[in-house]
Every structure is written in structure tokens, then in C-alpha cells.
Amino acid sequence: MLSRVADSIYWMSRYVERASNTARFLEVSYHLNLDLQFGGEEQWAPLVEITGDMKLFKARYGEASSENVMHFLMFNPEYPNSIANCLQSARANAQGLREAMPSEMYEEINALGKLVPAASKERAFFHSRVFELCRQVKRAGMMLSGIVSETIERGRGYHLWRLGEFLERADKTSRLLHVKYFYLLPKIADVGTPIDDIHWNALLLSLDAREAYYRTHGLVNHENVIDMIVLDKGFPRAILFCLRAALDSLNRITRDVPAEPHVQLAALCERLDNMTAREIIDIGLNEFIDELQLDINGVNNSIFTHFNTAPAPPVGA
């Protein structure tokens, strides 16, 4: 497979997944602020902090109000990881592969790429539409996953899509955990209180995991939530599940020929496989996430080095 085609498939997948997960970022912050609005002022700055782009945000907007943060992450044409830009980038990649993909897949990506930019023209009314758009982006992402699963032969193209999708999802799930950390950090006294439960419930909701959690674990307990979101091998948005799926696809792309990306990703999977939620808590959630994101970035860079493509774009949201 030509490196240009492989690169386009890989990043088309990552951009769609990135947009979907940024929509989840907005939703979890919305739910948290809605539930906590009577206990103090709203907090939207943590949502920008976890992207690592606070400097860019402040230069453009100044105050981290709900409207400014939502516009930055959803519509901003100058921010490369806004939902609008991610979807347009996915659409641009799809246009270069139009003849090599199912028509249903191309039509869905093409329509999705136009969705948010069209809404951004209604600047005065975007606040009332932003969560409707988040739902549409999430649904479209899930629909695309279904189209890929049902219509593409299990060759290298399929596994490149899965590799990008699952690496991106693992990274963004870890960043959703960072949202939880940043919201709780100023008020350590809230740990173990009903306010803490609200945070964990909002996090589960953002991952479409709340019903699955209640079926398997019952009442909300932070150790069980971390176990499900980080270490569960059966939940499709859990970090370990995503990394194992990415490793499987990487092996199929290279026909099980060992290389540096395999070594790094296999080692990361093995490390998580041998951990417990209690160990993560003892290490410190923030410290664990920081190290995990560095490891995922290392895998991403190693993949690009191994396949002799252009330098990888940044992984961060």
C-alpha cells in the first residue's frame, strides 16, 4: 500500500474519532457544570487546560467562559483540533480516496465535514445548537464505524482505519479522565462525597458507559470506575481494550513482523494488563495519565518512523 494512501486512511480515522471525542469533552463539562451550578461558579478552563492549548485560547478569547470555550473547541477555524477543523481534515483525506472507499462511507464523511462549518455561520445562535451538534457528531462517528465494519474487506486499509481509531480513542479516554482530575483538584475535600459521585457519573455518561457500569458494578465507586474505563478488556472505550485492538491491527498490517511500534505498544498493553485500579490510585491519577499519554504519543511517533511517512501531526486534542 502506498504510504500516501496509508497516511490518508490512518488520519481520516483519527480525525473522525478526535472530533467525536471532543464532542464528548464538551458534553461531560456541560453535565458537570449543570449538576454543580448551585455549588459555585462554572468551571470551563479545565477543558482547555487538558488540550495543552491554553496559550492559544487566551490570545484569541481571554476569559474561559462557557461560550468562549465551546466556540474554541467546536468552531474556531484557527484551532487545528476544533471539531470543525477535524471534520474538514477527514473530509479532505476522504476526497483523495474517493475511488478506493465504499460510496456510503464517502458520503457520510463528506456530509459530516460540512455539518459544523455550516452551523458556524449562525454565530449568534451557536450556543443553543452546540449540544445538538455534539450528538450529531457522535452519532455520525458511530455510524462510520459501523459502515467500516460492514463494508470493508479485512485488508490493510481496514486495519489502518482501526489502528488510527483505537489509538485516538485510547488517548482521548485518558484525557476525559484528566477532565475529572482537573475539576476535582481545587477541592480535594470533595473526594468521597456526593459531589465526587456526580463527577464520576458525568464521566461514565460521556463515554456511554453509565448503563454498562450499573449492570456490572452497581453503585458508583471511583475504584470500580477507573477499573472499567482504564483496564476493562471487554468495554470498547476502555483504554486497555483500545490499545489491545490497535496492537492486533498493527500486527495484521505488518503480518506479525516485529518492529519498534509493536514492541512499544505490546509493552504498554502488558503493563496495563498487570495493573489494578488500586495501583493507579496509589500512583496518582494525574501522574498515571501523564505517563500514559507520553507512551501513546511515543507509539504514534514510532508508527510514522517505521512506515517512513511524514512526521506525525500532534496527538493532543
Image (cartoon, rainbow, N blue to C red):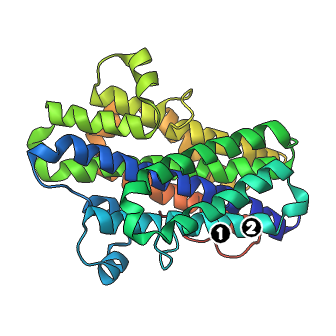
Distance Cα–Cα, label 2 vs label 1 = 6 Å
Residue on which disc 2 sits: 93
Tell me the quarter of the picture where residue 58 sits: bottom left
Most extreme residue toward the bottom is 59
The location of residue 276, given as percent across then percent down, is 39, 30
Query: Observer-nearest residue: 197 or 264?
Result: 197
Residue at horizontal 19 percent and vertical 55 percent from the top: 42
Q: Amino acid at mark 2?
A: Asn
Q: Which mark is residue 199?
A: none
On the picture, is 106 further left or further right than 209?
Answer: right
* Relative to 276, residue 16 above or below: below
Tell me the quarter of the picture where residue 48 sits: bottom left
Query: Observer-nearest residue: 76 or 194?
Result: 76
Q: Amino acid at mark 1?
A: Ser
The location of residue 160, given as percent across then percent down, is 75, 53
Query: Observer-nearest residue: 109 or 119?
Result: 119
Secondary structure at badge 1 equals: helix
Around disc 2, counting alpha carbons within 10 Å, would you say few (fewer than 14), some (14 to 19), or many (20 or more)? many
Residue on which disc 1 sits: 89
**The N terminus lies in which quarter of the figure?**
bottom right
Residue at horizontal 64 percent and vertical 50 percent from the top: 165
On the picture, is 24 further left or further right than 153?
Answer: left
Query: Observer-nearest residue: 59 or 175?
Result: 59
Q: Would residue 162 be seen by someone viewing this image from the given angle?
A: yes
* Relative to 176, residue 205 above or below: above
How many numbered marks does the figure carry?
2
* Relative to 240, residue 114 above or below: below
* Relative to 14, residue 209 above or below: above
Residue at horizontal 81 percent and vertical 48 percent from the top: 104
